[in-house]
Image (cartoon, rainbow, N blue to C red):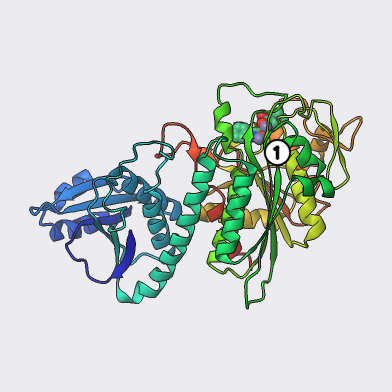
Amino acid sequence: MIINLQTQITPTGDLVIPISQSDALPDQLAAVAQRLNLPASVLQRDFSADASEVLPIYDTEGQRTYLLGLGKEPQAISWLRSFRKLFFSQKNKLSAQVGIDLSGFDAAAIEAAVLGVLGGSYDLRLYKTDKTDTSAFFSDAGQLTLYLPASQHPNAQDAVTRAEAMGQTQREMLDLMNAPANYKTPQTLADWALNSGRQYGYDVRVLDKTELERQGLGALLSVSQGSDVPPVLIVAEYKPEGVDAVHTLGLVGKGVTFDTGGVSIKSSANMHLMKSDMGGAAAVLGTLEVAAKLKLPIHLIGIVPSTENSTDGRSTKPGDVITSYSGKTIEIIDTDAEGRVILADGLGYLLRHFRPDVVIDLATLTGSVIAALGYHAAGLFTQNDELAVQLAEAGNRTGERLWRMPLWDDYKEDIKSDVADVKNFSGKPLAGSISAAKFLESFTENHPAWAHLDIAGMAFADTEFGTQKNATGFGIRLLIDYIHNMA
Ligand code: BES
Ligand code: ZN
Ligand code: ZN
């Protein structure tokens, strides 16, 4: 599908008219009714512009116009969701040519609309043998035309470029997230990163098992011990060419390609969803790729410790004490609290080899954050108030919302070990996402601008794409927005 811009609405193919809920709605509907030769009262009766509401209208030639509701004062996320829903649900019915009336809307709305359209083509049927694709619109011959006055074209063109960059990367991350463990190992993530780095001109190094042993990443190695597939540490670095990057941002993402729980094995009911325990890695790798594609003026470092967490005679056992890359010892109380253990080495590696101004880690870390916030926000943990505000605002702008949780030292008691420097689990079913964050904090060497995002509820969720939870791509739009506004 290709995208172009035009000034005049031409009556070919389908037309989508996005409409928000405001006092102007009756007049807007009257104008649409006039264009379509209908009584205004009919549209005013049948369409209230609720978010994602769709009203298809046919003219006497059979031409189709969709009125698409956006709700009240729509933010980018309403645009994105409404468009994605419409294009996903209609993809096999759409004409090869679809136009959207976007005149008067700003670049952020246009970007979100286009990203929504692109997102609507997502196909979860990765491993079906019969993949008959009947969407003319999403084929190579498909065409999306954005109708806007000429004065809006330069901004709209930039918005389309950004949406296409984001859409393509996000789709690849969804595929990686949705891939099961027999199609995805730590090396799969490493290969993706190496390829992306080559393609978009940033540096990617992969530390293999031998190298991890040589350098002493004992925490990552201890989690991988029970698995047949070797662990990796991915180290990606993007520096813009020709421009001075003002800030250095270090990102660390949890890349557990499958989490059985290890010897502290999970119950089987929802274990299959644990193929998605690399949502932090997807957010970090995706952000590096998008930043490199768009040549953003930021120095970015992305670290992904990646492993499976499996059960075997060689697995780490509860009670074992391991030595992390930082030199700190960890008593493993529960092998299912493996994310924080590998992140300890990820953070340790970042802080020993780079000098980031800001450090953000992302991880599908705890069920506890889901108990606290459900599926509507990720947990945000930081001692830095300014960083908390900046990240929360990026969350509100993108709809990838964050909610700040406390990091008081009272919770530090939960991770005190009798025998080692820290333990990986309190042993109590209380405040689990906070004690996990306190554990991570002890590996940040008091960095003044560190934030931890627990995205367990947000990375894999109910979507229109399937009946089971599946990947959302959470975090990439959030971080790119944060980077845009960092200066
Ligand atoms: N990967 C899980 C967290 C998770 C749970 C992600 C549900 C997505 C959905 C993590 O490794 C884990 O198992 N955490 C345990 C920690 C506990 C044993 C201390 C948890 O939260 O139950
Ligand atoms: Zn676990
Ligand atoms: Zn996990």
Outermost bottom residue: 242
Residue 394, quarter of the rendered image: bottom right
Quadrant of the rendering where the C terminus is positioned? bottom right
Tell whether 156 sits left or right of 357.
left
- Which residue shows up at 75% across the image and 45% down it? 209
- Which residue shows up at 34% across the image and 37% down it? 130
Tell whether 129 sits left or right of 27.
right
In depth, the one of 212 and 470 nearer the eye is 212
Determine whether 197 is above or below 434 in the image: below
- Which residue shows up at 77% across the image and 25% down it? 427
Quadrant of the rendering where the N terminus is positioned? bottom left
In depth, the one of 71 and 66 nearer the eye is 66
What residue is disc 1 on? 339
List x then y, in percent, for residue 484.
Answer: 57, 65
Indicate the amino acid at tag 1.
Answer: Gly
List x then y, in percent, for residue 216.
Answer: 84, 46
Mark 1 falls on what kind of element? helix
How many numbered circles does the render carry? 1
Instruction: State whether residue 403 appears in this view.
Output: no
Instruction: State whether residue 53 appears in this view.
Output: yes
Outermost left residue: 60
List x then y, in percent, for residue 195.
Answer: 57, 57
List x then y, in percent, for residue 103.
Answer: 30, 66
Residue 243, quarter of the rendered image: bottom right
- Which residue shows up at 32% across the image and 48% down it? 87
Outermost right residue: 419
Ligand 3 within 8 Å of disc 1? The answer is yes
